[in-house]
Image (spheres, rainbow, N blue to C red):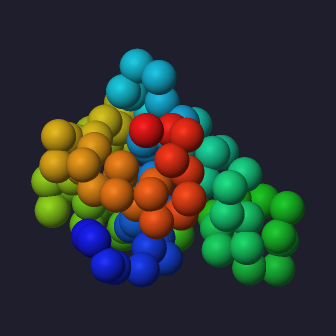
Amino acid sequence: MPGKKSNSINDLLLFILFSSTKDGKCSFQKLVKEFFDAFPEISSLKGYPQWPDTRKLDRPLRMLRKKKLIKGDPKTFFTLTPQGKREAKDIAKVLGQKKLL
């Protein structure tokens, strides 16, 4: 991750999971809310910018699970794996969120 620009939805999802959970667990509903609050311009429904589009998170979440950076599913909750946590910390540094570390 060093030297990589952080701007993909995958990276932003890792960052949100890292920064918005205190116990390490995040429900899908909370993840959608936090992601929409932080990045409404890329997560809103087309034609309805005041509402989040959950479909925009589906494929990135599956990709993060496939890469073994997160565990979980929308019916339970999501958690970062140790590798996912390391990458999320790197992303937080890139985004200038050093206070979260």
Q: Residue at x 78, y 59 (%)?
A: 51
Asked if 88 appears above or below 6 in the picture, the reply is: above
Q: Is residue 9 left or right of residue 3?
A: right
Instruction: Between residue 29 and residue 24, name the one nearer to us.
Output: 24
Instruction: Between residue 100 and residue 14, name the one nearer to us.
Output: 100
Q: Which residue is drawn at 73% across and 73% down?
A: 41
Q: Is residue 60 left or right of residue 80?
A: right
Q: Residue furthest top?
A: 23
Quarter occupied by the N terminus: bottom left
Quarter occupied by the C terminus: top left
Residue 60 x %, y %: 37, 67
Residue 15 x %, y %: 46, 53
Q: Is residue 38 left or right of residue 26?
A: right
Residue 58 x %, y %: 41, 63
Q: Quadrant of residue 73?
A: top left
Residue 37 x %, y %: 72, 51
Asked if 21 appears above or below 60 in the picture, the reply is: above
Q: Quadrant of residue 77?
A: top left
Q: Residue at x 44, y 73 (%)?
A: 6
From where the camera sits, is residue 55 visible?
Answer: no
- How many numbered marks, from 0 up? 0
From where the camera sits, is residue 53 visible?
Answer: yes
Asked if 34 appears above or below 36 in the picture, the reply is: above
Q: Quadrant of residue 23?
A: top left
Instruction: Between residue 79 and residue 28, name the one nearer to us.
Output: 79
Q: Which residue is drawn at 19% across and 41% down?
A: 81
